[in-house]
Image (tube, rainbow, N blue to C red):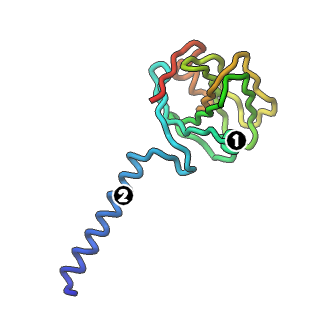
Amino acid sequence: MDRNKKIKILLLAFLIVVITLLSFLFFRNYSIYGNKINKIKIGGSEFKAEIVNTPEKLERGLGNRENICDNCGMLFIFPKSEKHSFWMKGMRFGIDVVWINGNEVVYIEKDVPFGYGKVMNPEKQSDKVLEIKGGTAERVGIKVGDVVEFK
């Protein structure tokens, strides 16, 4: 094979790798943890939320992760509406916990520190819970009664 043909093949292979990496970074629908990512809008704020709904992933949640980005979250989807309790097992950073029933915020625990040892028991039933970075609910004005849009 001549030199020019080898260079063209290498350039084509490099271009394919670059396009694949860029499409993964900008258009990915799954997190590096294998969870589907959906957009969630609460008030004027939009979050990229990892969706978890298996017993193992519901139990692990964000535990053992180092951090989460400012507009990221994890959405726990439960089979039925109940009073779903949460704890900070394995957490390494503070979070806000937002309980959602249908398309409405029904309860919020704000700025829960990573060392928090108690179980959080909501006052209302919910079928979903969103965990976001600590302080975010206050910063963006999320409140009980807000409508939640799932995209």
Nearer the camera: disc 1 or disc 2: 1
How far apart are the alpha carbons under marks 1 and 2? Answer: 33 Å
From the top left corner, tell me how far across and down residue 138 is, in percent: 58, 21
The residue lying at 74 percent from left, 36 percent from top is: 88
- The residue labelled by disc 2 is 20
In the rendered image, residue 101, in percent from the top left (x then y), is placed at 61, 20
Q: Nearer the viewer, residue 138 or 45?
A: 45
The numbered dot on residue 45 is none
Picture residue at 72% right of the left edge, 36% below the top: 114
Furthest toward the front, the residue is 79
Q: Quadrant of residue 77?
A: top right
Q: Is residue 36 left or right of residue 88?
A: left
Q: Amino acid at mark 2?
A: Thr
Toward the bottom, the furthest residue is 1
Would you say 6 lies left or right of 87 here?
left
Examine the image and state in which quarter residue 111 appears.
Answer: top right
Q: Earlier in the sequence, mark 1 or mark 2?
A: 2
Q: Can you tell which mark lies on residue 55? A: 1
Q: What amino acid type is highlighted by mark number 1?
A: Pro
Image vertical order of residue 47 relative to residue 62, above or below: above
**In the depicted structure, whether residue 32 falls above or below residue 101:** below
